[in-house]
Amino acid sequence: MKFEGRDIISIRDFSREEIDYILKIAQAMEPLAQKGSDMLKGKILATLFFEPSTRTRLSFEAAMHKLGGSTIGFAEAEIASVRKGENLADTVRTVENYADVIAIRHPLEGAARLAAEFAKVPIINGGSGAEEHPTQALLDLYTILKEKGTIDGLKIALVGDLRYGRTVHSLAYALSNYNVELYLVSPESLKMRREVLEEIRGKIPVTEETDITKVIPQLDVLYVTRIQKERFPDPAEYIKVKGSYKIDLELLGKAKKEMIILHPLPRVDEIAPEVDGTSHARYFQQVWNGIVTRMALLALILGEVK
Ligand code: NCD
């Protein structure tokens, strides 16, 4: 296994063995996230975010700082030279002179892969359109492992916008490496992308469902997502599916006591605030897990952890 110098573009580029190793290093990062370290002193991370973000960008930056490194970048492409018409390849070939690693989020599918073709430094995909979000999938897996002690043997549902949501694409690919049963719960028009479904169906049992009440009693993990309003070509289509699922106390009355709820956040109205105080809710712990997972990734690709 070699991580040094590697790009993180798609979760499909990683084997189960490699994913398990990343999760192990994430766990080893927990004490360093508490007390800090100078492991990446002198290293610079650039964050190029062409789309809105709170958690992904800030947790990459926090991860870098906790390991003693520093960060540069922009969170608003409107103020960068992109506004003057600079293309992605030129932006990347410029920024690689300033940084040892680049995290990029872009509205277009394939953008991170394109950036990696031009860059001499490693590129981390922080979200490429509706396609993938590999580092989110890793922190999701880390959260499941930490909370449940295992990933194998679990029954897991991905709920909400399985068509335009990129986190569920990466997570479905990632979970297909494990011995899990997957339920894909969405409105008809927001079903899982066919290419993802075809690939994972060959590896694990998958059930598609529109009615969440049918699957909730057997679940160990409920992974809820936001309907991705901004990715709908037609606003009328969004209105039809808006508010399709609402996780509330009444629905949770049908769930196992130990079932955990995850959400990549931001949430809109798909999880009622009354759920936050229940023993099911783990979405804010998940945010913390994003830091240690990203610390692990940075340390591995910068060659400080072998
Ligand atoms: C997600 C994203 O940007 O894909 N957020 C995140 O990174 N945690 C989910 C979303 O926007 O709904």
Image (cartoon, rainbow, N blue to C red):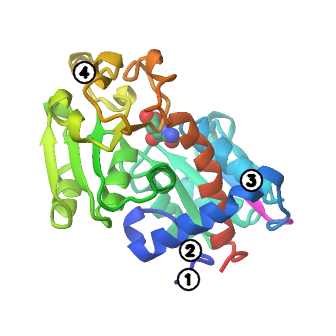
Q: Is residue 231 left or right of residue 5?
A: left
Instruction: Please say if the residues under marks 1 and 2 sit with CB atoms less than 8 Å apart.
Output: yes
Viewed as shown, does residue 206 lie left or right of 140? Answer: left
Q: Whole-Å distance between the Cαs marked 3 and 4?
A: 38 Å
Inspect this view and state whether residue 192 appears.
Answer: no
Q: CA distance from mark 4 to mark 2?
A: 39 Å
- In which image quadrant can residue 44 be found? bottom right
- Residue 26 x, y percent position in the rendering: 61, 61
Q: Give the residue number, with chain letter if any, for mark 2.
A: 6
Specify start and end residues of the magenta stretch as a single range.
41-45
Q: Which residue is mark 1?
A: 2
Residue in the foreground of this view, choosing between 150 and 61 = 150
Residue 257, percent across and down? Answer: 36, 34
> Compared to 120, does 146 lie above or below?
above
**Is the C-beta of the residue carrying label 3 under 8 Å from the nearest atom of ligand 1?**
no
- Residue type highlighted by circle 3: Ala
Instruction: Indicate if the residue with disc 1 has its beta carbon within 8 Å of ligand 1.
Output: no
Q: Residue 244 — which label?
A: 4
Residue 255 visible to an observer of this rendering: yes
Q: Looking at the picture, tell me which residue is in the foreground, 106 or 279.
A: 279
Q: Secondary structure at mark 2?
A: loop
Which numbered marker is on residue 33?
Answer: 3
Q: Nearer the viewer, mark 3 or mark 1?
A: 3
